[in-house]
Image: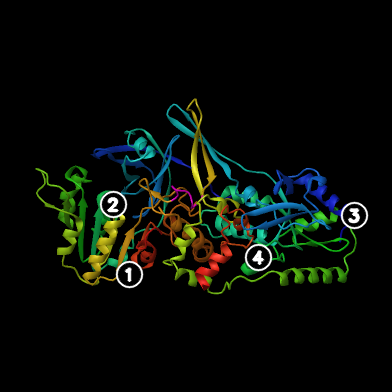
């Protein structure tokens, strides 16, 4: 158990060995960014979210009073832009310098939904991939994760529907739960244990602290509505591929790609060449891509998914059906970011419910 | 330390054959293992990569046939004997040739699709296949690939080609591949391999079904947009499958649901 001073000490201890990525305020948004000072953390603020609606406000009391930042750990583990290699040309022959990514990140404050998203990306890039991705692997293995249990929710949260939250279960180095007058600190790994042993400002945890945690989590969990049943959902959706509802969604969807950018699990990327003016060096760059892009499924200069409804279908079917066949999990963790950041306010919970159970 | 799947290797081009305008066949020196049906990613400096099927393999070399349609393939087609070709692979699955042992194997190739069936066709000539038939459709005489091999192939298998428009040097039929297929007498338990444009695959499957061949006896090699080739970039998805790693060859009954539906 630690107090606010213990939390500050932990933050600076982590900063000594890691580049700390934590929620902070930037341009009126709560975002994950490199945070150097404890004072720059977004503690005491809360995010207010709804379909196509976002605001940050000062919370009335408490510290971890928000849910999650607008971006996700994906932005660091699978960066929007990553150089894969540098290619140099000399005398007609090429030489390759493969990029090494060796940043040591500490994600300070990861919520249950985003922790599940990291586990899903682990499957995509490493565990269920016969060619494990060395860039993701390098960043992931070095990353230290401080998870935090949510004690607040926004109107777009649906982690309990997806079975990913609100309670953090495994996959962390340290876990923090904010209580009335302290922070409950739990250890999830040897690295976490070691970090706590270095901590001076800590107190013994008593049974009542765990009881308070349980109470808080139960209260939160009971307050979140269940939107649909996960059991058999993929099969139901496979039966709805010709539904006229897709065209109904097309009337609202702008194919702007916002949802795929903010999604903590959307992994699709493009590989592009960046050439120097001297034409002796070319870099191969991995860039986030989106199945909503008009050229995503282009074969011989023709995109196989011409209509926007077919692109939306690809996205939703991938998240809730194809993904299950590919990676043994859903591709959605119920963070609700795609609902908040959809300029048209399309609410994926409602669309899934209408399609599968309507 | 995991192997970097994007690492490229260099191979010397040891032979170049001009097939027709804008289509060249490259023999590259390599000891790399590969299987019929697989493909490689060929790289062009500053331009990118393109997935190209392995058209054949011999002692110490692999064969690729490349049509200049984009920046990458146009560059590759400018290469000549002695030049280096940079590539990675092989990727994807192989034709299920063993299933045809003791039976009839029918291969259907459309246009450049012949590059994807050539190796398995050559291999099938050496295997215990009861009857080997290859129907090949091409848009015109000039687009025919591998003309220099037809004589040898015809001596070992039943090869029938058809072209879209007549030509003074062409003694064979004109029309489209389905004209040949429609007239073909074939056993219901035959195995079929198809590679060609999507509409050709669909039309052929429909005729094969009329002849009593079930969809689980038909395999098709599909072409989709690929960037990573290792099942991570998402571009080549068709339903729950990644064409780059689960394919490019699919048993038709497994892919049908997604292949036949529009815009999947």
Question: Toward the viewer: B25 or B249?
Answer: B249
Q: Which residue is label 1 attached to?
A: B216
Q: Foreground residue, B53 or B153? A: B53
In three-dimensional space, the C-alpha distance between marks 1 and 3, rounded to whole angstroms, equals: 67 Å
Find the distance from the CA under tag 4 to the CA under tag 2.
Answer: 47 Å
Q: Which residue is disc 2 drawn over?
A: B113
Marks 2/1: CA distance? 21 Å
Q: Is residue A294 magenta?
A: yes
**Badge number at residue A201:** 3
Query: Mark 2 vs mark 1: which is more N-terminal?
Result: 2
Magenta range is A290-296
- Which label's residue is closer to the chain start, 4 or 3? 4
Q: Is residue B240 above or below residue B9?
A: below
Same chain, labels 3 and 2: no
Whether residues under marks 4 and 2 lie with C-beta atoms below 8 angstroms apart, the answer is no
Q: Are marks 2 and 1 in contact (CB under 8 Å)?
A: no
Of badges 4 and 3, nearer the viewer stands 4
Name the mark nearer the viewer: 4 or 2. Answer: 4
x and y, in percent, of residue A189 in the image: 74, 60
In percent of width and height, residue A246 lies at 46, 62
Look at the numbered disc 1 and give the secondary structure of its residue.
helix
Disc 1 chain ID: B
Look at the numbered disc 3 and give the secondary structure of its residue.
loop
Q: Is residue B185 left or right of residue B247?
A: left
| Pointer 4 residue | A159
Foreground residue, B180 or B65? B180
Front-lying residue, A285 or B34: A285
Mark 1 is surrounded, within 10 Å at the Cα level, by few (under 14), some (14 to 19) or many (20 or more) other residues, namely few
- For image coordinates 69% across by 69% down, the residue present is A224
């Amino acid at each position: 158990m630690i107090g606010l001073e213990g939390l500050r000490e932990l933050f600076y201890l982590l900063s000594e060995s890691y580049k700390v990525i934590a929620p902070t305020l930037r341009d009126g948004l709560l975002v994950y960014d490199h945070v150097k000072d404890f004072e720059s953390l977004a503690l005491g603020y809360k995010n207010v979210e709804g379909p196509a609606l976002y605001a940050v406000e000062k919370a009335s009391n408490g510290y971890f009073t928000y849910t999650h930042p607008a971006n996700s750990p994906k932005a660091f583990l699978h960066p929007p832009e990553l150089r894969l290699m540098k290619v140099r040309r000399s005398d007609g022959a090429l030489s390759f310098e493969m990029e090494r990514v060796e940043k040591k990140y500490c994600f300070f404050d990861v919520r249950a939904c985003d922790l599940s998203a990291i586990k899903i990306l682990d499957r995509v890039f490493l565990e269920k991939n016969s060619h494990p991705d060395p860039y993701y692997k390098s960043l992931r293995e070095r990353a230290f994760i401080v998870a935090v249990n949510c004690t607040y929710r926004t109107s777009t949260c649906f982690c309990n529907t997806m079975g990913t939250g609100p309670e953090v279960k495994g996959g962390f180095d340290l876990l923090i739960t904010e209580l009335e007058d302290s922070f409950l600190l739990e250890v999830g790994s040897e690295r976490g244990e070691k970090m706590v042993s270095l901590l001076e400002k800590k107190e013994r945890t008593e049974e009542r602290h765990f009881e308070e945690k349980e109470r808080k989590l139960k209260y939160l969990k009971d307050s979140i509505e269940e939107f649909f049943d996960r059991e058999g959902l993929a099969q139901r959706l496979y039966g709805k591929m010709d539904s006229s509802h897709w065209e109904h969604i097309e009337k609202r969807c702008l194919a702007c790609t916002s949802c795929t950018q903010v999604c903590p699990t959307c992994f699709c990327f493009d590989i592009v060449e960046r050439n120097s003016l001297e034409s002796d060096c070319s870099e191969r760059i991995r860039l986030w891509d989106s199945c909503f892009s008009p050229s995503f499924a282009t074969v011989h200069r023709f995109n196989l998914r011409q209509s926007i409804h077919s692109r939306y279908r690809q996205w939703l079917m991938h998240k809730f059906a194809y993904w299950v066949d590919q990676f043994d999990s859903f591709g959605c963790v119920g963070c609700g970011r795609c609902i908040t950041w959809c300029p048209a306010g399309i609410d994926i919970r409602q669309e899934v419910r209408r399609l599968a159970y309507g | 330390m995991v192997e970097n799947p994007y690492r490229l290797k260099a191979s010397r081009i040891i032979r170049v054959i001009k097939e027709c305008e804008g289509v060249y066949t490259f023999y590259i020196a390599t000891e790399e293992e590969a299987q019929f049906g697989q493909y490689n990613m060929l790289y062009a400096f500053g331009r990118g990569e393109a997935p190209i099927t392995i058209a054949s393999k011999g002692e110490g070399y692999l064969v690729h046939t490349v049509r200049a349609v984009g920046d990458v393939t146009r560059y590759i087609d400018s290469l000549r004997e002695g030049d280096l070709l940079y590539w990675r692979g092989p990727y994807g699955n192989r034709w299920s040739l063993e299933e045809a042992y003791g039976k009839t194997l029918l291969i259907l190739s459309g246009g450049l699709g012949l590059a994807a069936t050539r190796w398995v066709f050559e291999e099938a000539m050496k295997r215990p296949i009861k009857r080997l038939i290859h129907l090949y459709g091409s848009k015109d005489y000039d687009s025919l690939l591998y003309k220099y091999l037809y004589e040898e192939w015809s001596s070992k298998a039943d090869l029938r080609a058809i072209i879209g428009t007549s030509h003074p040097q062409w003694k064979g039929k004109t029309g489209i591949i389905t004209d040949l297929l429609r007239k073909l007498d074939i056993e219901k338990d035959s195995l079929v391999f198809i590679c060609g444009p999507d509409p050709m695959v669909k039309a052929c499957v429909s005729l094969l079904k009329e002849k009593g061949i079930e969809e689980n006896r038909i395999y098709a090699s599909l072409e989709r947009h690929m960037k990573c080739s290792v099942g991570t970039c998402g571009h080549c998805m068709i339903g729950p499958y990644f064409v780059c790693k689960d394919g490019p060859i699919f048993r038709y009954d497994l892919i049908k649901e997604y292949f036949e539906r529009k815009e999947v």
